[in-house]
Amino acid sequence: MSRLNDLLRQLDTKDAALAADLRREVDALADRRAFGLNFERHVPEAVELPGRKVRKGDKVRVLPPRGQNRTAENDTLWRVAAITTDTDGIRTAQLELLDGSDQSSASIDDVVVVAEFRDPIYPGLVSTGKVERGGDRPFHTVINAENFHALQTLLYTHRGKVDCIYIDPPYNTGAKDWKYNNDYVEGDDLYRHSKWLAFMERRLLLAKELLKPDDSVLIVTIDEKEYLRLGLLLEQTFPDARIQMITSVISQKGSARAGEFSRCNEYIFFVMVGDAAPLALNDDMLHDSVTDEGDEVEWGRLKRNGANGRRDRSANLFYPIFLNEDGTFHSTGEPLPKNKPREDVETPPGTVAVFPVLTNGQEMSWGLSREKLESYIPHGYVKFGAIQRQKHQKAMIYYLTSGYVEAAVRGEISNVGTAAAPKWVHTTSKGMRPMTVWNKVSHDAGWHGSRLLDRFIPGRNFPYAKSLFAVEDTLRFFLAKKPHATVMDFFSGSGTTTHAVMRLNRQDGGTRTSIIVTNNEVSADSQNAFWRQGLRPGDPDWEAQGICEFITKPRIRAAVTGRTPDGIAVKGEYKFNDDFPMADGLEENAEFFTLTYEAPLRVSSNREFARIAPLLWLRAGSRGRRIEDVTSGWDVADIYGVLADLDQSEQFVKAVVANEQVTTAFIVTDEDRLFQALVRELPDHVECVRLYESYLRNFEIESGRSVR
């Protein structure tokens, strides 16, 4: 609809009457809403690619002169019709509007390539550094990129392989906290909410394909500005998943807002795909108390409560239990017929008959049948209280619920008393289902987000950093039993997700890997200041202040090494689940990449292998040596191999067979028959991937269906 409005405004200048007639018809159609979440699916986004070499046929924008801010005129899209070079070596781009209605020209230095999300991309990755302290452990991956294109790229390497996606997307507060089509979205934008929904939907559709269909989870944090719309969007995007939203306190003191309640919480959506479910750990996230080894179990009351527990609802569960005067068990009696008074029951000498009766005389029923009760007693699964001289309730009787009985059989709880006087205790920490309200001091975003971040990168301000321990706890509910999980975050900001995954690995020896994506944008205020200073995106001084270069990479490097960017030991200690000095660092590996945009002909002719090599390494598992060059014809690394010259296939096959750790073989060939012949020669456990057919086809398909 917003696109129609733009077209109608253009028509106003040429034929106002026709524009008015069309606008009335458009307004009438706009009132006909389908049921469900409705929003304007805006013109597909576009991303500028500063630093990308300008080629003939590229879409570009013309930048303003240095020292001036951008205007709406600089958002016009042109196509490069030709590139000329004069006698002084100055290169000029000859431009035409996309519809061919106008022409212009500009210096190559004054144009920036633009990729619209409907256009196919052919991405590569260039390493911009790494930090290694984890030996042969797999690498965490940090990608500097526009996240939509990064998601398309990761579909080639990780489709259906991701265990958990955790994202903290822009909250759309109206305070210029995110961009749409290169412009920060402000609070007075009439299409602010629909732009946000279109922005999110495109990314969630790609994220859905990255998740393992049988057991995975998407976790999304949000605040009150968009949580209602986000909930509906998730329902529509993941119709087969189980979705639950919890409330998490992130500020113990709250944030005062004029005329409103003080805000102290945010929301977390859990989209559970397949068999995914939160684990029962030793903390319910709401109460301070946790149950640990040696703690006594919680006994259940044998007497039932509520309307369904009344005598007339369960005739076979109303029977006498005879206790000796000292409160020990004697025997049980037959269930009473519906109309027989309990006072008519004959009691064995020296015993007291106990019935499931409330203090007010209401007759209820027992929680176990007579036969089940008698089978439980010898094992110590039933506990009898002292005889009470009350009119109705003669004694309290307790029992182990079915979950505890199963735990006893598994050895997770043990009886440190006797069968007659049982005392069951936990032999390990007791699992507790997390509540839907979380209130943990460790989740305070001030103390354990922004202030903690300042310890690792002192003086580098990053607003609204997540509490490291909040992210860690959130992930633990789904990853505690998955020590080799793959975790992804495509709104990574300061890199908290990778930091949290590293800490989880330290706590249980896991080798979980994270793949996080962040762009290198600067804040709205910094952007305007940089324009006035004559800087542009792509300039070293501009890029050095971007999120990825200034915050994310230094934070992760400092977390691993225990040293700040200035080489000083990080001050303080980690708290809560794992206490140790931050200066000790973490025994992990991480590598940093920037997404590039390649020409398909150069890729298919094997002239950009160095840019594609990291993608092959990622697809194979991001562990061990990376194959950077295949000019020799072939190479086999720790877990994968690449064959570029089919004349050397015999040596390649022998090397793959000799290395049982190899799981993937990339074969460069245009001949399907030869490819299939090689597949038959390689071991069954090796995935064979044909280059560059699989690569090119992946991105051509994605460009055709990812944008609505």
Image: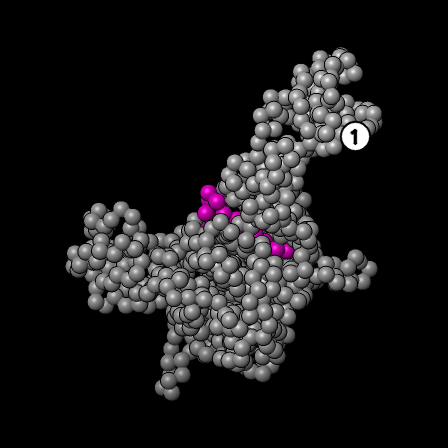
Going by the image, does 57 lie left or right of 305? left
Residue 554 position in % (x across, y down): 51, 73
Query: Can residue 16 be seen here?
Result: no
Residue 214 part of the magenta-drawn span: yes
Residue 225 position in % (x across, y down): 69, 56
Q: Residue at x 63, y 21 (%)?
A: 370
Disc 1 target residue: 388
Q: Quadrant of residue 82?
A: bottom left
Q: Amino acid at mark 1?
A: Gln
Residue 604 position in % (x across, y down): 30, 61
- Against 291, residue 450 (above or below) is below
Going by the image, does 388 lie left or right of 104? right
Q: Residue at x 55, y 70 (%)?
A: 581
- Against 9, residue 277 (above or below) is above
Task: Bin the neighbour count of mark 1 within 10 Å (Cα to Cα): few under 14, some 14-19, many 20 and up.
Answer: few
Which range is magenta?
210-223
Query: Can residue 636 be seen here?
Result: yes
